[in-house]
Image (cartoon, rainbow, N blue to C red):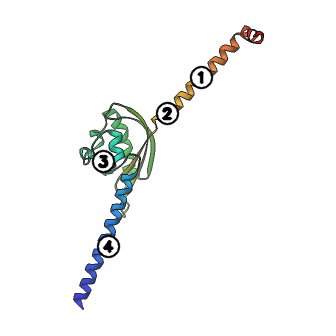
Amino acid sequence: QFVLQRERQEADRKRIEAQLSEQLHLVEELIEAMPLPVYLKDCAGRYVRLNRAFELFFHIDRKELIGHTLTDLLPPADARLHLEKDAELFACKGMQVYEASVHSRDGVTHDTVYRKAALTRRDGSVSGLLGVIVDITERKQAEFEVLRAKEMAEAASRAKSDFPWFYGWEKQA
């Protein structure tokens, strides 16, 4: 009787371990499949997980950054804002969304939106944070070009109205 109960408990334990392993594998695959840079940090601000998109965005190998902090990735001027935001998130929990310029290791400056969320344990204490980076550089450039085109059109319109003789010539043609 005792032996059967022990075998049943062992079988249940193995089944639960297999289910947990499958769930962990699924979460890891989801993070890796994300087309946006995704990262996880512990409470000390050390990177514990990065996806491939993060590696490509920052031109780094994740092995170089795992266990290290933001100050090992970004120039001090860039890191300062993110360190402050991380501290706020660790203190207040919840989520954050903010824009920031980021200088990647290839020398390119990216306009980005950071979306971060505090990760909590069952008891409510913070265990780390999850971050996603959205590169909005192209959108910002397009907005700038539209604004520039609008300003040029308005300037041309003002110039045309400043010269009444232009209208007379235009009517004669």
Residue type at mark 1: give it: Glu
Secondary structure under tag 3 reads loop
Distance of label 4 from label 3 (alpha carbons)? 31 Å
Tag 2 residue: 140
85 or 2, nearer to the observer: 2
Secondary structure under tag 1 reads helix
Residue type at mark 4: give it: Ile
Does residue 19 show up?
yes
Tag 1 residue: 151
Label 1 crowd (10 A; few <14 / some 14-19 / many >=20): few
Q: Residue at x 36, y 61 (%)?
A: 26
Residue 42 position, x and y percent, is 30, 52
Q: Is residue 92 above or below residue 22?
A: above
Residue 151 position, x and y percent, is 59, 22
Distance of label 2 from label 1 (alpha carbons)? 16 Å
State which tag comes first along the sequence, 4 or 3.
4
Residue 31 position, x and y percent, is 37, 53
Distance of label 3 from label 2 (alpha carbons)? 29 Å
Secondary structure under tag 4 reads helix
Q: Is residue 92 above or below residue 139?
A: below
Distance of label 1 from label 3 (alpha carbons)? 44 Å
- Label 2 close to label 4 by CB (< 8 Å): no
Tag 4 residue: 16
Distance of label 2 from label 4 (alpha carbons)? 49 Å
